[in-house]
Amino acid sequence: MGLKKITICWLLFTVVANLQFRVAETQDSDRRERVRRVNDYKAEVIKTLRKQILQQAAWAMQQAPVTVTAQSSPRSAGGKHDFFSEGDYWWPNPQSPDSPYIQRDGMSNPDNFVAHRLAMIRFSQIVGALASAYQITGDEKYVAQVLKHCKAWFTDTATMMNPSLQFAQAIKGRFTGRGIGIIDTIQLMEVVQGLLAMENAKTMDRQALEAIRNWFEQYLHWLTTHQHGKDEMNAANNHGTCWAMQTAAFARFTHNDTLMRFCRDRFKNVLLPNQMAADGSFPQELRRTKPYGYSIFNLDAMVTMCQILSTKEDNLFTYTTPDGRNMRKGIEYLYPFIADKSKWPKKPDVMYWENWPVAQPFLIFGANAYDNKEWLKTWKALEHEPKVEEVIRNLPIRHPLIWL
């Protein structure tokens, strides 16, 4: 090879090496910035919620496990270990009380059986509080208490719940269970996230953790193969979003990369383009009798999906459809009505209008993703410990610290 060729090759090598170095340097700088931002937002969350978290954890340390076996309903077609609930908006027919129930959309029937749902919410609250306290203090006592509850729900043959949801959201005289009932297990998302937050603890029972993972592997199989699961996956509103959100959370817990890729693809190609309008609103939720609450709920679910599924290489917070729909637009559409509810252009919700908004997860996750201090400020000022059952039920992310 002549001197000229050697010189050219050396120059090319030098240029390529410099470019690679600069790319690596930029990527490293971006990574450091992301870490700094997350740490800053975690610090803000701890500063805002520290007292509340430690109080909730003190309460949780005193609680004994209560699972689906503690209460039952004669209207359930399932067994002792089967989760059972009844459709919220279904009521006795006043013309004929013994006939099949009739629907009153948006109006919850207080006499329907919801004990299993309430037990699951309580379980979620306990694990979320203990895992958050562990993140703040590093105290291993919280790990043991979480495992006691998780074993009762998932591995103890006397008290465990079956890994399926065949009898959820039943309707007297019509259905023994429906796919729509799968939305009830969004309450288990903070359970698996709490376990992930604690999995490297010194006192973590590895054998128990794997047995719990096995329960969720079985439940994921049911979610993705049973007709109820397929029906819920294909729902065109918040139910379809919540199927994907919880499937993503459980898939991450069980290291199921195939399902996580499926959920990312579904977010990009089904949920976002089919549910979000060009202005960032959700028309399927706006046409309900509780459009404000449902819009908040669906946005929370979509943003939580982004929080669960985003990677450095595939960030769903920055993903935009070819026609311009993205999560930032969704938050920007709803945020003004969160900051000032009096600006809401629709009629007030038929129930619980006065109870929304609270400290919605889309605000803190969105603030972190887009570094928006205004959204953070609003999140900090809202209610962080709601007491209304309907609000708690529709706020499955109650402990943001374990998610950041």
Image (cartoon, rainbow, N blue to C red):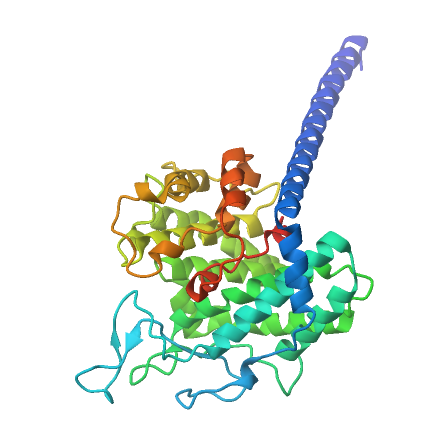
- Count of marks placed on residues: 0
Residue occupying the far top of the picture: 4
**Closest to the observer, 20 or 401:** 401
**Relative vertical location of residue 3 with respect to residue 171 in this rendering, above or below:** above
Is residue 214 rendered to the left or right of residue 199?
Answer: left
Is residue 319 rendered to the left or right of residue 75?
Answer: right
x and y percentages locating residue 88 in the rendered image:
35, 72
Residue visible at 34% across and 45% down? 281
**Closest to the observer, 39 or 309:** 39
x and y percentages locating residue 128 in the rendered image:
62, 61
Residue visible at 56% across and 66% down? 188
Query: Is residue 186 among what the camera can see?
Result: yes
- The N terminus appears in which quarter of the rendering? top right
Residue visible at 52% across and 48% down? 306
**Relative vertical location of residue 147 with respect to residue 100 in this rendering, above or below:** above
**Closest to the observer, 136 or 67:** 136
**Closest to the observer, 377 or 91:** 377
- Residue 169, located in which quarter of the rendered image? bottom left
x and y percentages locating residue 320 in the rendered image:
44, 38
x and y percentages locating residue 151 in the rendered image:
68, 77
- Residue 12, located in which quarter of the rendered image? top right
Is residue 160 rendered to the left or right of residue 78?
Answer: right
Is residue 247 rendered to the left or right of residue 340?
Answer: right
Residue visible at 27% across and 59% down? 289
